[in-house]
Image (cartoon, helix red, strand yellow):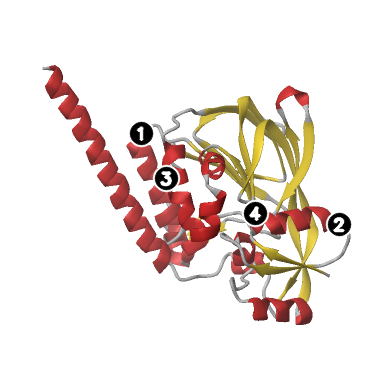
Amino acid sequence: MVIAAGGDGTIRAAAETIAGSGVPLALVAAGTGNLLARNLDLLADDIPNAIRTAVRGVDAGIDLARLEIHRPGGVRENAAFVVMAGFGLDAKMLANTDDELKRRIGWLAYVDAIRKALRDENRLRMAYRTERGTSRTVSAHTLIVGNCGALPANILLLPNAVVDDGRYEAVFLRPESVRGWLQIVFKIFWENGVVRRTPLGRRLLTPDVAALRYVVGRELQVRLSRPEELELDGDSFGLATGFDLRIDAGGLTVRVPEGSRPPAVRAGEESDPRPTALLAAIAILALAAGATVGINRILRRRSRRR
């Protein structure tokens, strides 16, 4: 058995190395995000419980996402991830994050990095193709591909991504305006995080909005029009022009508490939506305030011109 203590980046490196060997990986969630541990329903920052799970737990197979990364100049590199990979906002945020500040204050270090990333208005222009062979082009702000979909504070970014179902789920964020960002906030925070959590709510879900496009499959090819920052499991992974992805179903063995239910079973169950509802309200108010400030600036400029 291998025990990996750290965040998702540490877990990713260990998983990439031992995947396929049959050697189980035990997680000691001691990093910033610990998203794989959260999706496996393991407690974060509880080392005694993590060690008990490592010693007394049982083995379970989860999926591993394998990538062939296309680098500038035609170089190709193999890698893997267990949580999420992406281009756009999250990758630029990670590239802008100060590592020393992150060690000192944790996830709050991402706030300034997000501010810097949002100032970059460059859009991603890309072509993608799934295993079904249909090639499409899209212009998007961000692309995130997930092996599992739950984020901290009960946020469900990718509602159909489950770590042991043999599939990925990808989302293209395509906001054209403040209205587009409001659609994204409403869909991710409110519908995915609150409404979808109950059987009645799932019947009331609205159709997909223009600002979001979801794709589900087992293989995915992505080609960008120019090199962009790539992130894997919370780590900046340099510039890439695209990747070829395939899901290695059950390719990684992890140690989980005895008697725990598989993630695919828990995914359809109800959970407490209150943290997400609170974040949704805060996010909507923040976007509304930002929109108001932007509109007032435009009006002042026009009045000065007159």
Asked whether residue 258 is in view, the answer is no
Q: Which residue is mark 1?
A: 177
Q: Quadrant of the N terminus?
A: bottom right
Q: Residue furthest top?
A: 306
Residue at the spot 63% in from the left edge and 66% down from the top edge = 37
* Gap in angstroms between the C-alphas marked 1 and 3: 11 Å
Disc 4 on helix, strand or loop?
Answer: loop
Which residue in the protein does label 4 denote?
83
| Marks 2/1: CA–CA distance | 45 Å
Residue 113 or 25: which is nearer the viewer? 113
Residue 85 rendering spot, x and y as whole percentages: 63, 45
At label 4, counting other C-alpha atoms closer than 10 Å, the crowd grade (few under 14, some 14-19, many 20 or more) is: many
Mark 2 element type? loop
Tell me which amino acid carries mark 1: Ser
Q: Amino acid at mark 4?
A: Val
Q: Earlier in the sequence, mark 1 or mark 3?
A: 1
Sequence-first tag of 2 and 3: 2
Marks 2/3: CA distance? 37 Å
The residue positioned farthest toward the right in the image shown? 21
Q: Which residue lies under the disc numbered 2?
A: 20
Looking at the picture, how far across and down is residue 273, in whole percent?
43, 67
Q: Nearer the viewer, mark 2 or mark 3?
A: 2
N-terminal-most mark, 1 or 4: 4
Give the mark, 4 or 3, whose residue is nearer the N terminus.
4
Residue 112 visible to the viewer: yes
Q: Residue sitting at 35 percent across and 52 percent down?
A: 283
**Residue holding disc 3:** 184
